[in-house]
Amino acid sequence: MAEEPKETGQTKPGFQNPVAGFGVTFKAMFKKRLTEQYPEQQKTTAPRFHGRHQLNRHPDGLEKCVGCELCAWACPADAIYVEGADNTDEERYSPGERYGRVYQINYARCILCGLCIEACPTRALTMTNEFELADSSRANLIYTKEQLLAGLEEGMVDSPHSIYPGTDEQDYYRGLVTEAAPGTTRQVAVSKGEVPQEGASTFGEDEPASGKVTGR
């Protein structure tokens, strides 16, 4: 027969175990209650808080997202949907060959784990301190690219537009481009259904364009 364990001085009788467990509860009963006055008084979040996502821009306004879909592959909740497309000289959204044409995050699925941020190779996707994401409609919880894209700051021009003259994609990632080139204007987003203005020209109003081209 197996020997019974010997009782030591540190062994407590069985009836004391529940009492020791409830001791934590009794201590908490007499502590001062902490009530958050939300939303009237919002508490400041931590600097690295995992909140709503943001699609960042380069200093000249072009988008950092290249449509690689690595964030979608890294997402454990399958909450991110990305469609990439090719840039053209007439309609450029990012310095590289491709850009994110469609970008959606479903916050009904997102667990705000931040794995998508770690997977992004261009630091295009980061997380903000915004946490008020609740809504009464599931459709409203699907944020589109327009909702996630960062706003324009001083020195930026809204995409699409041409890259800074004399630079390439690598120069953007080296931080050599700090603002949009003088005279940079927004291109026509044909892929979004925008129609170029008929007869638009940089020539004078009183002289036909054909006359200036031929020198007549």
Image (tube, rainbow, N blue to C red):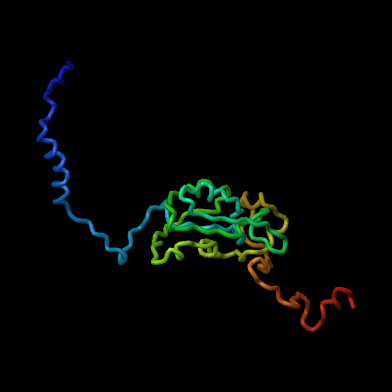
From the top left corner, tell me how far across and down residue 39 is, in percent: 32, 65
From the top left corner, tell me how far across and down residue 175 is, in percent: 61, 52
Residue reaching furthest bottom? 206
Number of marks present in the image shown: 0
Q: Quadrant of residue 32?
A: bottom left
Query: Looking at the image, which residue is at 9% across and 35% down?
Result: 15
User: In the rendered view, would you say 86 is above or below 195?
Assistant: above
From the top left corner, tell me how far across and down residue 212 is, in percent: 85, 76
Quarter of the picture holding the C terminus: bottom right
- Between residue 95 and residue 191, name the one nearer to us: 191
Residue reaching furthest top? 1
- Between residue 126 and residue 14, name the one nearer to us: 14
Query: Looking at the image, which residue is at 45% across and 57% down?
Result: 128
- Between residue 174 and residue 188, name the one nearer to us: 188
Quarter of the picture holding the N terminus: top left
User: In the rendered view, would you say 94 is above or below 214?
Assistant: above
- Between residue 15 and residue 66, name the one nearer to us: 15
Taking the image as shown, residue 139 lies to the left or right of residue 61, namely: left
Query: Looking at the image, which residue is at 67% across and 61% down?
Result: 92
Query: Looking at the image, which residue is at 60% across and 54% down?
Result: 67
Taking the image as shown, residue 121 lies to the left or right of residue 34, namely: right
Taking the image as shown, residue 157 lies to the left or right of residue 22, namely: right
User: In the rendered view, would you say 73 is above or below 44?
Assistant: above
